Amino acid sequence: MNHLKNFFYDKNDIFIALIILAAATLIILWRIEVIMDYPKDLVASAYEEKANQGPVTTPYDRDDNAGTVSDSAVSATGDAIDDSGLGSEEPEVYAIYVNSGQNLTELGNILASCGFYTDAEEFLTYVNAAGAASRIQMGNHFIPAGATKEECIDYLCEVGI
């Protein structure tokens, strides 16, 4: 009997660790779908939060780096729609998509086409002055139409959707 008591006393820590490991495995297996869906749910909620802030212009074709900004915002009431189907008013918010590893000159050209900068060189000047060249995040960034040049860079440095 003493031999059995010494065996459990010596191996007690191993048994406890195995019980904890088994419990953790069972909990993970039971909740794996919820765990795997969490990033998708997080992105969806962030997109809803940004979308509820006002009309958003979205890219027509996300595979095309040059076509990452639409020409106009769609009016929710429909009163700003002209005969061609495009809104006649300026958009309130621009959606700028930054690809992974995208050249800053290309990004500057996109922002210049939106009217935030006169050209890509001016964008590069502001980025270098802010020291933000390595802080610009990939993803979809929502920038209000009236944003200043510095605010535009701040929006690009936030985590994109």
Image (cartoon, rainbow, N blue to C red):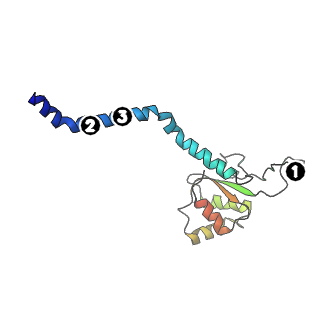
Q: Which residue is drawn at 58% across and 53% down?
A: 138
Residue 37 on image: x %, y %: 54, 38
Viewer-side residue, 117 vs 28: 28
Residue 151: give x, y in percent of width and height.
65, 66
Q: How far apart are marks 3 and 2 (CA)?
A: 11 Å
Q: What residue type is labelled 1?
A: Asp
| Numbered disc in front, either 1 or 3 | 3
Mark found first going from the N terminus, 3 or 2: 2
The residue where tag 1 is placed is: 79
Residue occupying the far right of the picture: 83
Q: Which residue is drawn at 59% across and 58% down?
A: 103
Residue 153, relative to residue 59: is it above or below? below
The 10 Å Cα crowd at callout 1, few under 14, some 14 to 19, many 20 or more, is: few
Q: Taking 84 as reference, is 9 left or right? A: left
- Outermost residue toward the bottom? 129
Note whether residue 32 is visible: yes
Vertical side of 84 occupied by 93: above or below: below
Which of 143/109 is in front? 143
Q: Can residue 121 be seen in this view?
A: no
- The image quadrant where one finds the N terminus is top left
* Type of the residue with mark 3: Ala
Q: Could you tell me if the residues under marks 1 and 3 are in contact, i.e. CB atoms within 8 Å? A: no
**Residue at the left extreme of this rendering:** 2
Three-letter amino acid code of the residue under disc 2: Ile
Task: Looking at the image, tell me whether mark 1 or mark 3 is earlier in sequence order.
Answer: 3
Label 2, on which residue? 16
Residue at disc 3, secondary structure: helix
What secondary structure is marked by label 2? helix
Query: Which quadrant would residue 141 be assigned to in this image?
Result: bottom right
Report which residue position mark 3 lands on.
23
Q: What element carries label 1?
A: loop
**Circle 2 crowding by C-alpha within 10 Å: few under 14, some 14–19, many from 20:** few
